[in-house]
Image: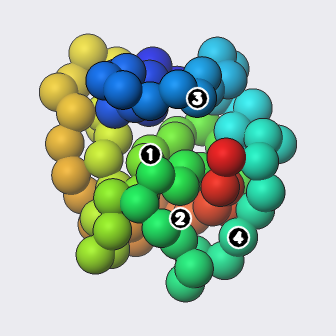
């Protein structure tokens, strides 16, 4: 979840949950078709990866621990849920 904290750390007032599975339960789930910038995209059925939706079909995430944060298509892996916090 640290990658979303990095994205939000400059000026955001919301503190994201520390455990990767908590975004799945925080806020309210919405359809991917209604995603807006700032929504959290949770990947895989085990909620093992979280990215921030940035608009235009793109998410911002760190693909693996220690990697630089980057933009990728929202459909880069199976989407489990989209959460608006």
Q: Is residue 1 visible?
A: yes
2 and 3 marks in contact (CB < 8 Å): no
Quadrant in which residue 84 is drawn: bottom right
Tell me the distance, in whole angstroms, between the alpha carbons under discs 2 and 1: 12 Å
Q: Secondary structure at mark 2?
A: loop
Q: Determine crowd level at label 4: few under 14, some 14-19, many 20+ residues with C-alpha closer than 10 A.
A: some
Tell me the distance, in whole angstroms, between the alpha carbons under discs 4 and 3: 19 Å
Mark 2 or mark 1: which comes first in sequence? 1
Q: Is residue 11 above or below residue 75?
A: above
Query: Residue at 57% of width from left, 64% of height from top?
Result: 79
Q: Would residue 42 be found to the left or right of residue 60 on screen?
A: right
Quadrant in which residue 10 is drawn: top left
Which residue was labeled with disc 3? 14
Mark 4 or mark 3: which comes first in sequence? 3
Which residue was labeled with disc 2? 78
Q: Secondary structure at mark 3?
A: loop
Mark 4 or mark 2: which comes first in sequence? 4
| Residue 77 drawn at (x, y percent) | 44, 61
Which residue was labeled with disc 4? 30
Between 31 and 68, the one lying in front of the other is 31
What kind of colouring is applied to the model shown?
rainbow
Which residue was labeled with disc 1? 51
């Amino acid at each position: 979840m640290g990658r979303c904290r990095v994205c939000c750390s400059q000026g955001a007032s919301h503190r994201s949950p520390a455990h990767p599975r908590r975004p799945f339960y925080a806020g309210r789930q919405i359809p991917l078709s209604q995603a807006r910038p700032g929504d959290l995209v949770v990947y895989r059925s085990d909620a093992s990866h979280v990215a921030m939706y940035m608009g235009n079909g793109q998410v911002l995430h760190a693909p693996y621990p220690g990697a630089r944060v980057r933009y990728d298509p929202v459909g880069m892996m199976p989407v489990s849920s989209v959460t608006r916090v």
